[in-house]
Image: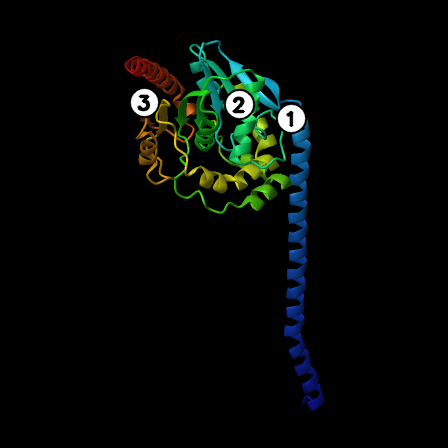
């Protein structure tokens, strides 16, 4: 029995419709899958955000107070004072060190048998207030000085880690009669390369606000693993890191890193000021790390550069060596200073 032409045409149309129908089903499936994926991502972001908010609130009560609050520019700055030595060492942190007084604790313990140690937590750090004031070097230096004035401390050795090398050189330039020596712990140098790089501040801000910082910290390695901190100190540093990291004050300081370096390029330490730098022996991140510091002491009457095997946070692993060498250096500088004074007389 033969198939009519009309039937053949109907069958042809049916066959032609099959690919179109399959395509529509595939598109519909893809759209549904994308919708499910988008919903899943939105739910995941919402969960991360809510968990972070709830956790921050509950963790606030677990943070233990330490040090003392002093009035600065209408706000409160936290300062830890330890030891009763005749000479005072003022400790300044590197950028982003969430809880400076706790981070410096091992070094403070090594220094306090011989010195009175004052660990400053600038605005946005540790237990200090945050501020909307621009984080220019000038403002940061002025605030630190006001804190010391509030404590009636007017003669001291300035010891700083990392970016405190930039703040320190301006501090000495502004208050030369108060600083008796400068100690840099792997401290920054105004002329070091790469400090004009554009930083993704918006990304850091988003990571902090959405709560993904907490997730990243949880999934990342333990930064304190293998270090000699007490367990309770590590727990407190982690809690304060979650509270402080990438807060608006810190992000504003990040925004000012490049101009702050630029503004300090013309500054040098006074040649009469005892000056010692304790730095990494192998800093692969900054070209010419050792020569940069040697350049800083070349005109110093009493200057020294010492290298140590270790990471950028040398005081985490070399606190004892740092304290011993600083003490020895300062004693030598005192003798040298007395000899020079005697010659002048």
**Residue 343 marker:** none
Question: How many residues crowd mark 2 within 10 Å: few (<14), some (14–19), many (20+)?
Answer: many
Real-space Cα separation, disc 1 to disc 3, in angstroms: 38 Å
124 or 282, nearer to the observer: 124
Instruction: Say which element carries label 2.
Output: strand
Counting residues from the start of the chain, the first of labels 2 and 1 encountered is 1
* Of labels 2 and 1, the one closer to you: 1
Left or right position of 162 against 38: left
78 or 301, nearer to the observer: 301
**Residue 128 sits in quarter:** top right
Position of residue 298 measured from the top left corner of the image (x, y, whole percent): 30, 30
Q: Quadrant of the C terminus?
A: top left
Does the image show residue 144? yes
Query: In the rendered structure, are the residues bearing label 1 and label 3 in contact, judged by CB atoms less than 8 Å apart?
Result: no
Instruction: Say which element carries label 1.
Output: strand
| Residue position for label 3 | 302
Real-space Cα separation, disc 2 to disc 1, in angstroms: 14 Å
| Residue position for label 2 | 120
User: Is residue 261 depicted above or below 83 in this figure?
Assistant: below
**Residue 4 sits in quarter:** bottom right
**Residue 75 marker:** 1
Give the residue at x 67% y 35%. Answer: 53
**Residue 115 sits in quarter:** top left
Left or right position of 41 against 315: right
Position of residue 130 measured from the top left corner of the image (x, y, whole percent): 62, 31
Left or right position of 233 against 303: right
| Number of numbered discs overlaid on the protein picture | 3
105 or 323, nearer to the observer: 323
């Amino acid at each position: 029995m033969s198939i009519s032409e009309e039937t053949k045409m109907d069958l042809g149309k049916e066959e032609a419709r099959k690919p179109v129908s399959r395509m529509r089903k595939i598109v519909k499936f893809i759209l549904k899958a994308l919708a499910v994926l988008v919903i899943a991502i939105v739910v995941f972001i919402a969960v991360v955000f809510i968990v972070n908010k709830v956790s921050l609130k509950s963790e606030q009560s677990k943070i233990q107070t330490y040090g003392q609050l002093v009035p600065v520019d209408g706000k409160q700055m936290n300062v830890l004072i330890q030891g009763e030595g005749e000479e005072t060492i003022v400790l300044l942190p590197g950028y982003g060190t969430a809880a400076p007084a706790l981070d410096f604790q091992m070094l403070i313990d090594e220094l306090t048998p011989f010195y009175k140690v004052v660990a400053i937590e600038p605005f946005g750090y540790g237990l200090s207030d945050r501020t909307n004031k621009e984080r220019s070097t000038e403002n940061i230096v002025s605030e630190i000085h006001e804190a010391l004035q509030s404590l009636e401390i007017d003669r001291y050795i300035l010891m700083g880690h990392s970016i405190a090398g930039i703040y320190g050189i301006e501090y000495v330039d502004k208050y030369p009669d108060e600083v008796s020596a400068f100690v840099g712990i792997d401290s920054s140098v105004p002329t070091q390369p790469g400090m004009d790089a554009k930083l993704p501040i918006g990304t850091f801000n988003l990571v902090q606000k959405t709560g993904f910082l907490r997730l990243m910290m949880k999934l990342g390695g333990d930064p304190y693993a293998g270090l000699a901190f007490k367990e309770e100190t590590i727990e407190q540093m982690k809690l304060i890191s979650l509270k402080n990291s990438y807060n608006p004050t810190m992000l504003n300081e990040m925004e000012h890193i490049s101009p702050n370096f630029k503004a300090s390029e013309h500054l040098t330490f006074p040649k009469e000021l005892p000056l010692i730098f304790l730095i990494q022996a192998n800093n692969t991140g900054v070209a010419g790390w050792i020569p940069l510091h040697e350049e800083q002491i070349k005109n110093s009457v009493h200057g020294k550069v010492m290298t140590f095997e270790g990471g950028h946070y040398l005081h985490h692993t070399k606190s004892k060596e740092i304290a011993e060498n600083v003490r020895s250096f300062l004693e030598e500088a005192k003798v040298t200073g007395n000899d020079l004074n005697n010659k002048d007389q």
